[in-house]
Amino acid sequence: MWKFIVRRLIITLPQLLLLSLLVFFMASLMPGDAFTSQIDPSLSQDAIEEQRERLGLNDPWYQQYGRWVSGVAEGDFGTSTAHYRPVTDLIWERMINTIWLSLLSVIFIYAIGIPLGIISGRWNDRLVDQIITGYTYLGFATPIFIFALVVLFFFGFTLGWFPTGGSVASGLEPGSFEYIVSKLHHLLLPALSIALIGVVGTVQYLRSEIIDTKQKDFIITARAKGAPESRVYNRHIFRNSVLPIAAFFGYEITMLITGSVFVEQIFSYPGMGNLFIESILIRDFPVVTAVVLLFGLAAILGALLSDIILSIVDPRIRIK
Amino acid sequence: MSKSITGKLFFVLMLALFLVLAACGGDDEGNEEAGGGSEEGSEESEGSEGGEEDSEGSSEEETDPEDKIYDIENFPNQTSNEEDPIDGGHLNFGLVSDTVFEGTLQYNFYSGDPDSQILQFIDEAMLGMDTDHTYNNEGPATFEANEEEGSITFEIKDGVNWHDGEPVTAEDWVYSYEVIGHPDYTGVRYGTVGFTLIEGMEEYHNGEADEISGIEIHDEKSFTINYERLTPSLTSGGIWTYAMPKHVFEDIPVADMAESDPVRENPIGMGPFKVDSIVPGESVELTANEDYWDGEPNLDGVTVKVVNPNVVAQELETGGVDVVDAFPADQYPENSNMENVEWLGDVAGSYSYIGFKLGDWNAEENRVNYKPDEMKMGDVELRRAMWYAVDNNGVGENFYNGLRWNATTLITPWHENFHDESIETPTYDADEANRILDEAGYEDTNGDGMRETPDGEELTINFASMSGGESAEPIANYYMQQWEQVGLDVQLVDGRLLEFNQFYDRVGQTGEDDPAIDIYAGAWSVGSDVDPTGLYGPTQIFNFPRYESEENTELLEDGISEEAFDQEYRKEVYSDWQELMVEEIPVFPTLYRSEIYPANERVTNYDITRYAIEWQDVGVTQEEPVTAE
């Protein structure tokens, strides 16, 4: 197992290097650079050219790449051209926001998804199951950006129960009780939007697994031995049905970091998804490259985590 | 049995739900189309994604405001609420943007417009500005120009202090010049006449001198700048008027200043409001600066927060924000009935235009290479006919409800002293366009319904137009149809609209003009100085048409000569220039624009003339914002 993990981690490095090379190359093909948006006759073109020169934007992309790689090797991801600050600081600031949002969404997804899945699987084809399944179909069919907008307008504007943008109210002392409450208040609506749509997969997986497991021989054996129904469900069926969900957990962790572009945009929530889109639009390449790398890393580690979890919860699967 | 009935019932329910959802979807689309896009073509606002304006809808009552035509002249500049402001009022300012603000809160380093919207509260130009865009002596400092010696002497008034209580000194102001001119400076402000004309500036900028020889500090409050020559551009926006607290920045290397604490976390200025706290990228909490030189502000505090353009109307309606920095004009018609908001408006300093490529860029000599004889659009009669062929008022009314309207000359009414209304410019007249084309020899010789060149060759004009906003595409098509009606075959470059970055790359912002482009639709926002050299001068890369003529160069130089300190003379020069542009038509302006500023009814003393708001005067007349019923 350890061997496996180490091996996977070793492959990660060249993967990331390749990814960064690709990103850099493709970025060089994109029209415009960080100063294109400064098309403003009241600025001097010479001064802007000087800044381009200073940042090395006029060099061929492989030279820029070389500089960038040697910087990264020393832990320096460069400076954002739009924000005039180290990329790592910028990403860190946004990542915290995204992690909170995703964490809450994941909690909601499990808190809603697991009970619904169990109920739906246990009483399959009854009215309650049909309602739940109906909800999951609706959830599958509703695009998250429409749903989030509706939620925002109804709960945010019409009812006024929730703030309609940002991650925290202004003017609060960071770390104070009000600050934390305000953060949570700002998180609830976007997290719920993500969860209510994102949960449908979990419910469906769990439901079909439970229905499947219900008919297995060992369940019949358990029943024949006189195990009470609650025990049959909680111990025997649930445990065996939760496998695909557990396997999915690694990917959920990926989402913790990558965030949700749509929801962050709609709720003006300054997280990673928003940072990614913004940096592309304003051609802030140092940020774009770092963010893509981070997303790549998250995806690779998430997949690895999934494999590890799977091997732990399901002894039949052995990683060699 | 019962199971299958519930199943069927459920199916019916689902179907019904589906239909309801589909109906909603249809509605939304309708509104989106009617909404139109404000962002077409403007340099500042591109890159945003336009969409998601769906949920605005549902306001199709009464006269259908979406069909009404508005006139910017009918909008007041000032809120009508004349009650006295209450003590301890708090204003919510919406920063309309679909991205975060960058947080470079220092005039010498900021580059994005959102940051400047925050800066207007915390810092201030040392010189005041008249509505005709020239400096006056009503700001925190006064100036006196000495035309014989080519110098300007500045004197800072007493009682002008930084937020930390330290007085603003001559040294602080000069420090700005030393920082911006410094070889390690990381911002974009250097290089304009306000710097390059200063004696000894170049040596300092190249690192050959330790100080700027042309600047003499007399005492704590006054200093003189010696310029190589004086130009009216200096006194209409060219002088760098922002001071920088030297005692705060002194120990920070210039290269690191932009990311330093006094720029990002604890910005310091001398404006009417102090920074209390910042949530990076989202909001800033400001409190009144009681020590403000021009008297204590009426408000106790201001919250500046970023508001997404998609929800700005709702924020206004629910009182979430009292005023905003810019309201998307395309959302105005459907929101014009909002009860709790008063709508102010003003002419904007920007125009849309159609440009003709008349040459390319000579990178070696750093100037335009004007060669009309080799270019498809080289014939001025063809260009004139194309101007006559388009109905700009039609575009303004159909797509912008009159909030943009037919433009005449290249100096907008925003510069009211220089905009010459008396100049006759081509306006929509298809017959005239046809007549001009016939006379110039553009005739249909092969019977395909389209005109050929005088040499009998097929004429296809390639048109570059920018994407962004809902109306970008219909407007481009509208223009192409109008040209088609006078027999000109105009096609979109690549058959589609170009994204902002690509558009400017190909039109030539790096000097590599794409020869596939014959004409293009662009827009400019102009600065406080009326001088158009930056856009039409022969050595300017932004001279995208690559146009040059002796007369043009001469007029542009006259406009910034010492003689032009005489307003009447300068006015005459620019009248001649506007006239020349109508004759030569390297570009023709299509639409002038306006800005709409909503204000909650509790806001008083809010005057948006030329968007030079005196924030210390603004107040509110009740504790809570007025909300719509």
Image (tube, coloured by chain):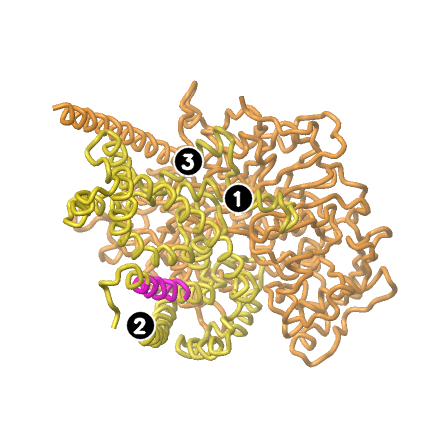
- Colour displayed for chain B in the image of the structure: orange
Magenta-tinted stretch: A294-308
Say whether disc 2 or disc 1 marks the residue closer to the N-terminus. Answer: 2
Main SS, magenta residues: helix
* Amino acid residing under circle 1: Leu
**x and y percent of residue A229 in the render?**
25, 39
Which residue is painted at 49% across and 43% down in the image?
Answer: B308
Is circle 2 on the same chain as circle 1?
yes
Q: Say if B460 sits above or below A15 in the image.
A: above
From this viewpoint, is residue B550 visible?
Answer: yes
Query: Circle 2 — which element?
Result: loop
Crowding near pointer 2: few (<14 within 10 Å), some, many (20+)? few
Say whether disc 1 or disc 3 marks the residue closer to the N-terminus. Answer: 3
Is circle 3 on the same chain as circle 2?
yes
* Residue at the spot of label 3: A151
**x and y percent of residue A134 in the render?**
25, 34
What whole-number distance in Å separates the C-alpha atoms at marks 2 and 1?
A: 39 Å
Foreground residue among A228 and B227: A228
Q: Disc 2, disc 1: CB below 8 Å?
A: no
What whole-number distance in Å separates the C-alpha atoms at marks 1 and 3?
A: 17 Å
* Amino acid residing under circle 3: Val
Which residue is painted at 68% across and 36% down in the image?
Answer: B90
Q: Identify the residue at the far top of this view.
A: B62
* Amino acid residing under circle 2: Met
Q: Residue B450's mark?
A: none
Q: Disc 3, disc 2: CB below 8 Å?
A: no
Query: Any idea which chain is the yellow one in this picture?
Result: A
* Residue at the spot of label 1: A184
Q: Residue A1's mark?
A: 2
